[in-house]
Image (tube, rainbow, N blue to C red):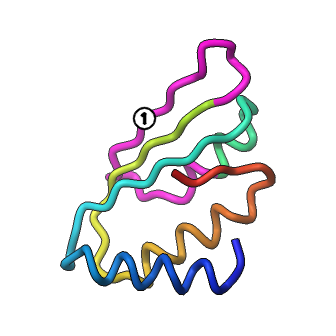
Amino acid sequence: MKEEDFQNLRQKIIESTSFPTVYMFKFIVESNNRKIALISSLFDEGADLHTKESSNGRYTSITAKQVLMTVDEIIAVYKKASEVDGVIFL
């Protein structure tokens, strides 16, 4: 994602969310243990984290719910996730 995309996302979150909030992230990555671990490591131990492999086993969706205090915390997770090659944000 480009910085402009993060700024647009930031604005949408600000308009639709009050803080603190339980925020839900959804990502899709190739079913590769390293990529799944990289995304999973972005969340605290207390986060509600679920993974589900696609029917053909090629991709894995990762859903995480975590309590966050500011929009900056949300954007930071997305920025770190964008460093994982091939990640898709939902």
Q: Residue at x 61, y 51 (%)?
A: 39
Tell me if mark 1 has few (under 14), some (14-19) or many (20+) residues whose alpha carbon lies within 10 angstroms of its own.
Answer: few
Say if 86 sits above or below 22 in the image: above
- Image location (x, y in percent) of residue 14: 32, 83
Q: Is residue 64 left or right of residue 28?
A: left
Q: Position of residue 32 (x, y in %)?
A: 75, 32
70 lies above or below 23: below
Name the spot of residue 58 as percent of width and height, x first. Answer: 73, 23
Q: Residue at x 60, y 13 (%)?
A: 55
First to last magenta residue range: 39-59
Q: Nearer the viewer, residue 38 or 24?
A: 24
Q: Amino acid at mark 1?
A: His
Magenta-colored stretch includes residue 38: no
Residue ID at (42%, 58%): 44
**Does residue 40 lie above or below 80 as drawn?**
above
Name the side, left or right, on which 84 lies relative to 90: right
Q: Which residue is mark 1?
A: 50
Q: Quadrant of residue 29?
A: top right
Per the image, label 1 sits on a secondary structure element best described as strand
* Viewer-nearest residue: 59 or 42: 59
The quarter in which the N terminus is drawn is: bottom right
